[in-house]
Each structure stands twice: as C-alpha cells, then as structure tokens.
C-alpha cells in the first residue's frame, strides 16, 4: 500500500509537469487536471459502498464468521484498474495527443486507489485485531515515507521517459 500511496503523490507531482511545463497551461487549468483522479475516487467510494453491502450480507449468511480475506475482493478490482491507468496516462502525455485522453486515463487510478486502500485497511484491522493500532501506525509510517520520497524523482522520471523528446 505504501507504493500505491507513493504513486498517488507521484501523480500529484507529475500533473503540473505534464500540463504546465509540457502543455503550457496556467495554474488554474493545471489544477483542473486533478479532476480525473477526483472522479475516480468518487466512483471508487460508490463501488466500495456497494461492495460493503455485499460483504455485510455474506457475513450475515455465515454467522458473522468470515476471515479477513473476505475484505480483499474489491482490492482485486482496484489492482486491475491501477496499472491500466498508469499505462494509459504514460502513453498519452505527449502534447500531440488531446489533453482529455490522459485526464480520462487518470480516472481508473483514483478508482483503483480507493478500492485497494479501503480493502487493505479493513483487512489489516480484521487480521491483526488487538494489534490493529500498531499495524496501522506502521502502515502509515511506510505510506508517509514513500509519499514523501516518490515526488522527489518525478522530474527525473519524466525527463528520462522514452518519449521525453516529444514532450517539449
């Protein structure tokens, strides 16, 4: 989950580079580029509510005896959406491609991020019941560390991107 959180912050650092430096947008329009991830997050929350209702019914049918792994199916959906989004965004950031294509490509990332994040947090709490606070603290430490580190190499990553010659 820490790598996923770092990737989210990598996106936060990449959007101004891609849309401001490469495409010449001003700050206002560059800020609007984050709406793609926002829409994905909203869709992910809606899906998560629906999935939780399914989990509650499953738990009720099994006499409240489900293992922590029962929390993970929505994580599978999210883990498919995230790499699709990353490839989509990376392949479409060149200025010759319409700006909406990478923005729409960031929607699955927001969607997948929420699904993986919520299901993993729930899994950790269910799996480490009395030690849940310690596990979540360690998880937060790792997330925060990678969330701080990943944006530091965003510019280098984009400058060494195979299509970097066509970005400027």
Image (cartoon, rainbow, N blue to C red):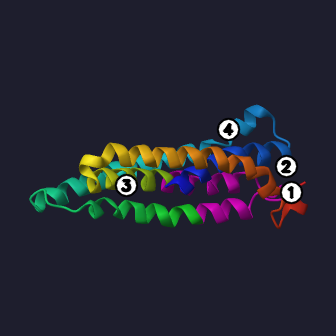
Q: Is residue 30 magenta?
A: no
* Mark 2 vs mark 4: in front: 2
Q: Is residue 29 above or below residue 141?
A: above
Quarter of the view holding residue 101: bottom right
Q: Tag 1, which secondary structure? A: helix
Nearer-N-terminus badge (1/2): 2
Task: Identify which residue, 145 or 27, lies in the foreground.
Answer: 145
Left or right of 95? Residue 43 is: left
Residues drawn in magenta: 84-112
Q: Are marks 1 and 2 in contact (CB under 8 Å)?
A: yes
Closer to the chain start, of discs 2 and 4, is 2
According to the image, label 2 marks what residue? 22
For label 1, the residue is 167
Question: In the rendered image, which residue does mark 3 sit on?
Answer: 119
Classify residue 98 as left or right of residue 111.
right
Disc number placed over residue 32 in the picture, else none: 4
Q: Marks 2 and 3, how far apart in space?
A: 36 Å
Q: Earlier in the sequence, mark 1 or mark 4?
A: 4
Select label 3 or label 4 by which is in front.
3
Q: How far apart in space, not on screen, are marks 2 and 4 (Cα)?
A: 16 Å
Q: Is residue 10 above or below residue 80?
A: above
SS of the residue at dot 4? helix
CA gap, disc 1 to disc 2? 6 Å
Is 163 on the left-hand or right-hand side of 76?
right
Residue 107 x %, y %:
57, 53
Q: Is residue 111 magenta?
A: yes
Q: Residues within 10 Å of mark 1 (few under 14, many from 20)?
A: some
């Amino acid at each position: 989950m820490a790598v996923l959180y770092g990737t989210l912050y990598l996106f936060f650092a990449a959007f101004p580079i891609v849309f401001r430096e490469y495409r010449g947008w001003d700050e206002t329009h560059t800020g609007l580029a984050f709406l793609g991830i926002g829409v994905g997050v909203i869709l992910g929350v809606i899906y998560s509510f629906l999935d939780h209702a399914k989990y509650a019914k499953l738990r009720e049918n099994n006499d409240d005896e489900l293992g922590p792994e029962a929390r993970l199916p929505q994580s599978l959906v999210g883990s498919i959406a995230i790499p699709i989004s990353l490839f989509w965004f990376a392949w479409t950031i060149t200025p010759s491609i319409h700006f909406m294509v990478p923005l729409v490509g960031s929607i699955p990332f927001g969607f997948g991020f929420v699904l993986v994040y919520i299901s993993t947090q729930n899994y950790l709490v269910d799996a480490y019941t009395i030690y849940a606070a310690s596990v979540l603290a360690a998880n937060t430490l790792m997330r925060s560390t990678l969330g701080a580190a990943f944006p530091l190499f965003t510019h280098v990553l984009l400058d060494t991107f195979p299509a970097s010659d066509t970005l400027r």
